[in-house]
Image: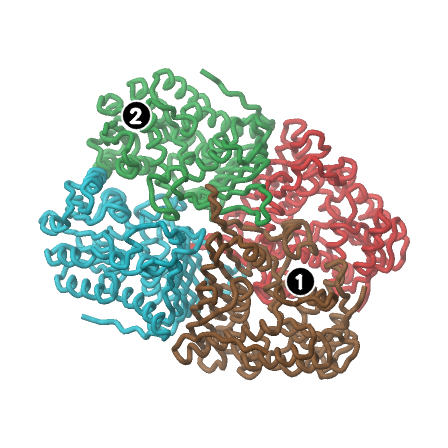
Chain colours: A green, B red, C brown, D cyan
Amino acid sequence: MDEIGVGMLGYAFMGKAHSNAFKKIAYMTWPPPLVPRLVGISGRNTEAVGEAATRYGYEYATTDWRELVADDRIGLFDNGGPNSLHAEPTIAAAEAGKHVVCEKPLGRDAGESYEIWRRVEATGVKHLCAFNYRFVPASRLARELIEAGELGEIRHFRGRYLQDWGDDPSLDTWRFSADDAGSGALGDLGAHVVDLARFLVGEIASVSGFAKTFLAGRAVDDAVEAAVEFESGAVGTIEATRFALGRRNAFQWEVNGSKGSLAFDMERLNELQVFRADGDRARGFKTVLVSEADHPFWEHWWPPGHIIGWGDTFVHELHHMLRAIATDGDVAPYGATFEDGYRAAEICDAIVRSGESGSRVALSYRTL
Amino acid sequence: MDEIGVGMLGYAFMGKAHSNAFKKIAYMTWPPPLVPRLVGISGRNTEAVGEAATRYGYEYATTDWRELVADDRIGLFDNGGPNSLHAEPTIAAAEAGKHVVCEKPLGRDAGESYEIWRRVEATGVKHLCAFNYRFVPASRLARELIEAGELGEIRHFRGRYLQDWGDDPSLDTWRFSADDAGSGALGDLGAHVVDLARFLVGEIASVSGFAKTFLAGRAVDDAVEAAVEFESGAVGTIEATRFALGRRNAFQWEVNGSKGSLAFDMERLNELQVFRADGDRARGFKTVLVSEADHPFWEHWWPPGHIIGWGDTFVHELHHMLRAIATDGDVAPYGATFEDGYRAAEICDAIVRSGESGSRVALSYRTL
Amino acid sequence: MDEIGVGMLGYAFMGKAHSNAFKKIAYMTWPPPLVPRLVGISGRNTEAVGEAATRYGYEYATTDWRELVADDRIGLFDNGGPNSLHAEPTIAAAEAGKHVVCEKPLGRDAGESYEIWRRVEATGVKHLCAFNYRFVPASRLARELIEAGELGEIRHFRGRYLQDWGDDPSLDTWRFSADDAGSGALGDLGAHVVDLARFLVGEIASVSGFAKTFLAGRAVDDAVEAAVEFESGAVGTIEATRFALGRRNAFQWEVNGSKGSLAFDMERLNELQVFRADGDRARGFKTVLVSEADHPFWEHWWPPGHIIGWGDTFVHELHHMLRAIATDGDVAPYGATFEDGYRAAEICDAIVRSGESGSRVALSYRTL
Amino acid sequence: MDEIGVGMLGYAFMGKAHSNAFKKIAYMTWPPPLVPRLVGISGRNTEAVGEAATRYGYEYATTDWRELVADDRIGLFDNGGPNSLHAEPTIAAAEAGKHVVCEKPLGRDAGESYEIWRRVEATGVKHLCAFNYRFVPASRLARELIEAGELGEIRHFRGRYLQDWGDDPSLDTWRFSADDAGSGALGDLGAHVVDLARFLVGEIASVSGFAKTFLAGRAVDDAVEAAVEFESGAVGTIEATRFALGRRNAFQWEVNGSKGSLAFDMERLNELQVFRADGDRARGFKTVLVSEADHPFWEHWWPPGHIIGWGDTFVHELHHMLRAIATDGDVAPYGATFEDGYRAAEICDAIVRSGESGSRVALSYRTL
């Protein structure tokens, strides 16, 4: 089996999640499309990044991501750093001929995201914006059911990503820095909702809404609210907040079509609610435990009903990327490309602009 | 026990619901504040209204509501007719000195609603706009918990009323007539969401959204979507639709505060989800079966866990109205007055105007 | 419409539930098979039974049930008294030519139950043992699905009736008196489980289990536990307890067949969980909101999704009895006859005997 | 960090689950108590075991488990083979001075289980019977709450392990062989229920029940049903089946005490239902998402609400074993020792004997 050298930027939350995934791909997805070789990891804190290298088995640690970019053994550059560190290293890695994965949001705003996409696309490498929730088995099953026409014409999407850790003025993280993060709940959570909306229902045509900051002195938004219309004519709502007490990781969405409906909650990520208007007397939403042999990604796992975890979505995502690299195949449409990352950013920006102007914003997307 | 004569306008859905409630009040709420005497019922179809009188025990039937207005034995006029029949009979009844109940939406738009309120308020009678979902035990418990400060400062309200019977071009009902109904999902379902939002969180300051009609040729809206801000600074979404397949009567709402959260679904109307940030290691949303001796309205019913039905909410509502009449007490704040009916209409209209203009609409409310 | 005179024994819990049902039948089930005329009510406390007569509209109250038995205007005698008052009045009423309804358990043990059945059956009147949970729409739908073969061959029944009010030594009610009640959780709750098991799966062949009393000095059982085998070869468990904290009225059962499964919880009595092994990729239990126009009993009620309450099951049950009387039709199999009441008692007794002897008890049922 | 050499018997289901766990322990539990070095793996099929060695990174493969026993580099022998291969290799490994993990059921019956325990205990090595469901965070949290007295005196345990893959006469696996497996649903699923019952509630005093085989010609049981009494006086039911259509991995249990209750379903393994009788007006079962920083095992994982999978329970289990080895600490009580494996077997056998004799079986446990 062929190897691919991996260079990782970031050793904290996403560094752990991605490193775990690369390690599991080597034996859980069998045979793997490429065997990830963990070459180098970079981060700002010398001691911490050194420990991370030991922990996850990277051959070396560095505080300078340029070292990874310059390393010829590295074929895949994975950027799990803060948002402010997405653009320059990702572009540099791509221009050095490495395939690139970048955590979402792609850039801190639509302009930066567009620039990343444009520069990287020009190099011809594969690029994936790590909207890992496309790789939840239930999300993929939902997409497949919709593609197969089982929902008919889509009427509604309502999505909300609810967390509750933001209501603490003493918290100090780069996620509350406008410069490091670009935005708050919007880019962190709202971007996931926007991406899933596009993944399941298609392009968004317009948004009416606003961003909201609850805590005085906080530099980024705490929540966003929007009423949206899709190009298809479907309508709905998009919401993200860090102020929904009791909701820990509740990315909830529902899609209603002319033939059926789907509903989901990330806190029960192994389940998809499926309704079909099939005339059955015993009608209702099915709780589908998405863990059957004929369900997406399940060939890698366990017998039915033996559920997987949040961390395993990264196994699916990075396996998808490795297969695209190995086969020179497409990252899209099941994986989000940098174009998807850019488009999500356009929509996020539009919600902010709608709030500032008080007007509905019609979306237009730049092309290359 | 004193009696009160009831005159009922409408014998169909709401006629059945209200008549059932008046009959049950007489023995389920014991002793009743006033014993309802079902004097007369009016409707357009002679045969049907006659049968309704027999069925529910009204002393007579008439096709002319003016007969009820002129009947001195009637002390309470209950208007369960189509929206276009709300204004004139309700005002006439009040001006004839009868207390009045009027189904929601109060009028077909804010202007008509204001006029009903203004004219009726001037007569000095008691008036109740039949937002019966204030009288779900879980709704009242929610209100009491919020009033007691258990949720702290409210950050979010998200409410949606989802039904699925609208996606049928062959349906023919007054509810699809712009003249009879005034609006579609907006006044039928959205008004309930707006009223509960005000009941639980307070006044709405602005809305950004729109109404949507899916079916060509349909004269009223099929769905509404809005991002809203409350005067308190809380933010959220309001949605109503008749196009959410599989959702039969899913009026779902959630409130997040700085100390806790509440969530509800009308399809499980006996349950309230309650989260408190109390530091308990075993934290999470409680499924409270609102059926205990110390829960709202439960003194009328059964042992704990022996749940009530949707129809029983009208028992609570009309019992509340009868008590207000008997004691010369307040309908507000637990019951919706015609002012509440008017304010809901202002907000509904604002959503439509926001959609037409593409701009956020700041609410302002008329006073008397 | 023809009337039937009703004589009611008992004015407390069951008196309220049955009286409410008779009153609602008159207009909610339209046209009713017979219009109940509430003639007389009897009870031990003069003042309380008098107030009950006023409250529910009985023409008179009496402390002597024999007065009801002697009253020619009464065609239906409804016994909602304590278990020790089931046999004599019910038999006397039947022998006076009145149709009879008797609350469960029919007698305090199998012998007494058999005697009630034998004596009443001999009179030729209609008799119904008030296992009202057969009249939950979800129970009836379950029965219909099973009868239609949709579950295939039944493999398992597991039923438990969990309540939690028993763990209080200070409680004083006839339900804790061996003489008044005959048994504790067994006859009160276990009998319901046994009846539903028979209703859905068929006759029980043997039981292995025991009754348990937790509180020292309590004269009746607090819980029963049994492993059971049906004549069909299906196997499962039956349990009843008043000591399951947090379970207020949780009569939960599940049936597994070779083609599908059903599951239910009385605390969500409007819902039936339905699984079918139909090869659908999106497989799982459906949450069926049993409230559609084509669902059992729903012709009496509201639009879909507008749920009913526990009290409404008695409307269905007594409507069924009135129709049987009006049409000289069968009470069985959808309603439980006194034979069903007797058979449930045989099974309940067998659980007790199994516990006493330490041996599995094979059931045999007496016939007339 | 010190290493420990691992020898694995079995490369299929449990081989995959345990190998994955050893690999994740090395970096997810940081720092690990011992770093697992995957030395050798054995299995009957040369090609398959060779591929497994490559896949999981074992240094060699062998078709003779004695090679592992003889390998001095191996300090921990992990037996994930069929039940008939539990006794001899496990005893041999222990007698060769290796710590041992053995999958459940420990032996094919109580006699064999006792012999394994006796022989292994005599060697002084650490031994763990792989009842991995003790290592679900919700199970451990349940145990901690019970140990802290939060449930008061335990009244009830009801546990059932429901799967649905057994109803297929064409299936051919060692699990249906009496010689290879010893029993069917009993040892495969029932043993888990029995172990959790002991883990949470304590020793079982007596069982009344039976095993059942539905399919003609099947050599092992398809289901078991039992009513049980604990030494403490608590009572309940134990059930296991492979014939519950729609239940894929539904190990469901509930515990009721005098102060509260707990409930669980393995299909939602990240959730624990917690009820406390604390006098709160808003009372009910909490859905606790067991994924907080102060929850068991969570120091290894992700932010709150980012759930783990079934496979991760083995990480906890084997980490526990490695820590016991590294610190010369206790496997019990949080891990099941071979004595626990033996006791579970006694109870399983007792259910079978109860079915055969028709009598309740009082448990007695052998000691060393």
Type of the residue with mark 2: Ala
Query: Looking at the figure, which quarter contains the N terminus of chain B?
Result: bottom right
Q: Position of residue C84 (x, y in %)?
A: 60, 82
Q: Residue at x 32, y 20 (%)?
A: A94
Query: Looking at the figure, which quarter contains the C terminus of chain B?
Result: top right
> Label 1: chain?
C
Q: Position of residue A2 (x, y in %)?
A: 23, 27
Say which mark, if any, is on residue C102. none
Q: Is residue D231 visible?
A: no
Type of the residue with mark 1: His
> Label 2: chain?
A
Q: Position of residue A284 (x, y in %)?
A: 56, 47
Q: Secondary structure at mark 1?
A: helix
C-alpha distance separating marks 2 and 1: 66 Å
Q: Quadrant of residue C39?
A: bottom right
Q: Quadrant of residue C111?
A: bottom right
Q: Secondary structure at mark 2?
A: helix
Q: Is residue B356 visible?
A: yes
State the residue position of label 2: A326
Name the foreground residue: A122 vs D38: D38
- In this rendering, the answer to whether D22 lies above or below A119 is below
State the residue position of label 1: C316
Q: Position of residue B327 (x, y in %)?
A: 76, 62
Q: Residue at x 28, y 50 (%)?
A: D314
In this rendering, the label closer to the viewer, 2 or 1? 1
Q: Are marks 2 and 1 on the same chain?
A: no
- In this rendering, the answer to whether C299 lies above or below B188 is below
Dot 1 surroundings within 10 Å: few (below 14), some, or many (20 or more)?
Answer: many
Dot 2 surroundings within 10 Å: few (below 14), some, or many (20 or more)?
Answer: some
